């Protein structure tokens, strides 16, 4: 922190400074993140899966998903033509797995974003206003926590009908409550700090207090919790699809498991139909969890082991 | 207690702040959903004070006597239970919404702890510029950066440090940032709630001197709340001594320090450490017994009577009014007010 360097930055524009500050914050975050080995492993695998999912439309032919245009046998074992065998309609399981990753990831990430937005909004409002607002919002959150998520999601899907959009909405609505509690607790901690009292003494309104002081201070926690929640959203989507509540027009890993089960792949011994989607779910969920835990310990240094 | 307190001395300017019968009771409730009030904490109980332009009014008293609640009432962080606070004739305790926001510009606060009162995620520029974001009509956006740098300069910090974060500054520098922020809206009255008690002694003097300098340059009026009597003596023109939510004695710094008449003031002053070792042990020392009674259940009559060596029957029945007594010209709320020198050596 020499005088010259700060004098130099003072000359540049405010926008450039804001970006430089963000870059520095990001670099600092990465420096901390890099020290977490499991987080790095999770991130590497995750990036690989995402890259594969993004590249799928270019490297494979979507026509292979159409049962009327495929030539494979029924539940063929892995061969050179079909590295992971075929399903009951003669489609390549490898192709299905690759395309299924896209739907699983899309639903997982979008539903989580929805849950996080609802959860943060409710949490910050409850923490900031307190009193009756907080009581009502938190009882609502309690209700969502107490009602079994799976049952709630199933009922909602049956009522709303099943397509990609409703699945995303249902998963989002069914899983915001935990985030709301977390964010409320953090908001209460921030609300107790004198700088908020100071902002009030200056005449700051509720919006100013929430957007300028509370949100930036709960944001890191929100990000870490987002990453963790993606894993459970993917699991919930797979569960719903496995139970036959998935979008019939989309292939996700859960849908594949459902079809494999329906087609009798278990008794037939068609392990190549069951393992790829199952392992896919396992790997992606594990990766998101590892990344989320690593981010959490960067954001909240108290979670780190006593070594440092 | 309707007697508005004034006293002589240098305070000849117009009255900028007047506090009349200010009362703040905090309810003690039981129950989570259906709250029942089972009592009240009488944090501030009938305070009358006046502040004149360019004057510093020191408010002293021990912990829990209502000093901080008094400060919060003055900047409308708490609503008074009853009584009024008028800033240049306008009663700010009755204002709401936009009018209140506007009135806040005139009366700002310097907080006690410079470590927690600055948001660690905001730069100094954002922190000092925050008042402009809340009151956009004070400074146009393109002007704000320059204004913030002027403020940094004003409080003796390097204007180039505008993009630094609070953790890069020392305690004294942080308190300067806090002062700069309070001055951003050009208030006429600054409430300083223990502004130096979280700082090292060597830094305390710098900050107090800065406050004094700013007062001369900007014509500010201060209410300076502290528990450190020496600091208050250094900066204050007039001093009010508080005990359990009431002002027990008020006067110029000379009145209070050299001619105290209330037993509580005398006890406080006799506890101030003496820098001259030769004087030690040659002073009239008063050691109070017991703790401050609970403000939820204050003693009847004079609130100090439970710890006072002069207490008699009248003290339990009659509340002593704050008025000039005992041959002294400044007001004191004691039935047996009598001057007693506790600061200087007696032999």
Image (spheres, coloured by chain):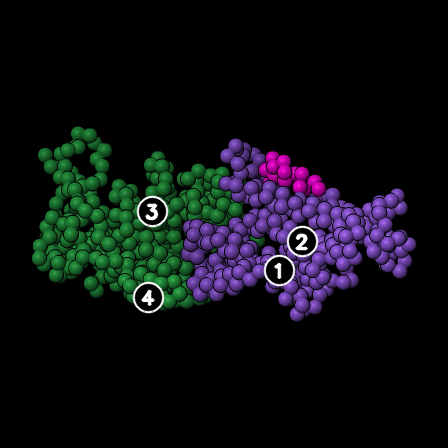
Chain colours: A purple, B green
CA distance for labels 2 and 4: 47 Å
**Could you confirm whether marks 1 and 3 are on the same chain?**
no
Relative image position of residue A4 (x, y in whole percent): 56, 34
CA distance for labels 3 and 2: 54 Å
Residue B194 image label: 3
Relative image position of residue A166 (x, y in whole percent): 68, 64
Q: Secondary structure at mark 2?
A: helix
Q: Is residue A37 magenta?
A: yes
Camera-near label (1 vs 2) is: 1
Q: Label 1 marks which chain's residue?
A: A
What is the residue that sits farthest to the front in this orientation?
A267
Counting other residues with Cα less than 10 Å from the Cα at mark 4, is it few (<14), some (14-19), or many (20 or more)?
Answer: few
Q: Is residue A139 magenta?
A: no
For the residues bearing labels 2 and 4, Cβ distance under 8 angstroms: no
Residue A234 image label: 2
Q: Label 4 marks which chain's residue?
A: B
CA distance for labels 1 and 4: 41 Å
Q: Which residues are magenta?
A: A29-45
Q: Secondary structure at mark 1?
A: helix
Q: Label 3 marks which chain's residue?
A: B
CA distance for labels 4 and 3: 34 Å
**Could you confirm whether marks 2 and 4 are on the same chain?**
no
Residue B96 visible somewhere in the drawing: yes
Relative image position of residue A45 (x, y in whole percent): 71, 42
For the residues bearing labels 1 and 4, Cβ distance under 8 angstroms: no
Quadrant containing the N terminus of chain A in the rendered view: top right
Camera-near label (3 vs 2) is: 2
């Amino acid at each position: 922190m020499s005088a010259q360097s700060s004098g130099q930055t003072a000359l540049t524009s405010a926008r450039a400074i804001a970006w430089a500050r963000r870059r520095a914050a990001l670099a600092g975050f990465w420096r901390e993140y890099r020290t977490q080995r499991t987080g790095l492993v999770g991130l590497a695998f995750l990036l690989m899966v995402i890259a594969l999912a993004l590249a799928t439309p270019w490297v494979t032919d979507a026509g292979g998903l159409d049962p009327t245009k495929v030539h494979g046998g029924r539940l063929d074992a892995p061969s050179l033509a079909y590295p992971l065998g075929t399903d009951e309609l003669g489609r390549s399981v490898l192709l299905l797995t690759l395309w299924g990753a896209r739907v699983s990831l899309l639903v997982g990430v979008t539903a989580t974003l929805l849950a996080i937005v609802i959860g943060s909004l409710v949490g910050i409002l409850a923490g900031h206003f307190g009193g009756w607002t907080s009581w009502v919002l938190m009882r609502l959150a309690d209700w969502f926590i107490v009602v079994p998520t799976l049952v709630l999601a199933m009922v909602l899907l049956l009522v709303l009908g099943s397509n990609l959009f409703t699945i995303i909405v249902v998963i989002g609505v069914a899983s915001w409550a935990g985030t709301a509690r977390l964010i409320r607790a953090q908001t209460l901690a921030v609300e107790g700090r004198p700088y908020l009292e100071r902002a009030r003494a200056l005449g700051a309104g509720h919006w100013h207090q929430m957007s300028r002081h509370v949100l930036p201070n709960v944001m890191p926690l929100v990000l870490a919790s987002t990453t963790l929640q993606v894993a459970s959203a993917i699991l919930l989507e797979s569960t719903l699809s496995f139970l036959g509540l998935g979008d019939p027009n989309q292939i996700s890993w859960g849908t594949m498991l459902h079809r494999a089960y329906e087609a009798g792949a278990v008794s037939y011994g068609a392990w190549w139909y069951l393992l790829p989607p199952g392992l896919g779910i396992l790997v992606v969920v594990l990766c998101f969890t590892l990344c989320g835990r690593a981010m959490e310990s960067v954001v909240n240094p108290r979670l780190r082991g006593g070594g440092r | 207690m309707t007697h508005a307190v004034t006293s002589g001395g240098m305070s000849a300017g117009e009255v900028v702040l007047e506090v009349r019968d200010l009362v703040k009771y905090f309810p003690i409730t039981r129950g989570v959903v259906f709250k029942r009030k089972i009592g009240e904490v009488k944090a501030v109980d009938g305070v009358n004070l006046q502040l004149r332009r360019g004057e510093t009014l020191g408010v002293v008293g021990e912990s829990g006597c209502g000093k901080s609640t008094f400060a919060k009432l003055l900047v409308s962080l708490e609503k008074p239970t009853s009584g009024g606070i008028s800033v240049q004739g306008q009663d700010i305790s009755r204002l709401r919404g936009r009018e209140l926001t506007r009135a806040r510009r005139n009366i700002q606060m310097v907080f006690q702890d410079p470590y927690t009162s600055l948001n660690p995620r905001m730069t100094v520029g954002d922190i000092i510029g925050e008042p402009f974001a809340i009151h956009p009509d004070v400074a146009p956006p393109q002007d704000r950066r320059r204004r913030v740098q002027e403020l940094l300069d004003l409080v003796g910090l390097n204007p180039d440090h505008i993009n630094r974060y609070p953790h890069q500054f020392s305690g004294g520098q942080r308190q300067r940032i806090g002062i700069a922020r309070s001055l951003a809206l050009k208030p006429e009255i600054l409430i300083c709630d223990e502004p130096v008690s979280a700082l090292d002694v060597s830094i305390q003097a710098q900050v107090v001197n800065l406050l004094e300098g700013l007062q001369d340059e900007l014509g500010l009026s201060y209410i300076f709340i502290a528990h450190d009597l020496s600091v208050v003596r250094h900066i204050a023109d007039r001093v009010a001594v508080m005990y359990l939510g009431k002002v027990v004695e008020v006067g110029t710094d000379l009145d209070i320090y050299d001619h105290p008449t209330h037993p509580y003031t005398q006890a406080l002053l006799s506890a101030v450490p003496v820098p001259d070792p030769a004087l030690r042990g040659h002073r009239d020392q008063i050691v109070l017994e017991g703790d401050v009674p609970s403000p939820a259940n204050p003693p009847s009559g004079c609130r100090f009577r439970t710890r006072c060596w002069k207490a008699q029957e009248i003290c339990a029945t009659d509340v002593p009014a704050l008025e000039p007594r005992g041959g002294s010209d400044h007001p004191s709320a004691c039935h047996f007010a009598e001057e007693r020198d506790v600061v200087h050596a007696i032999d």
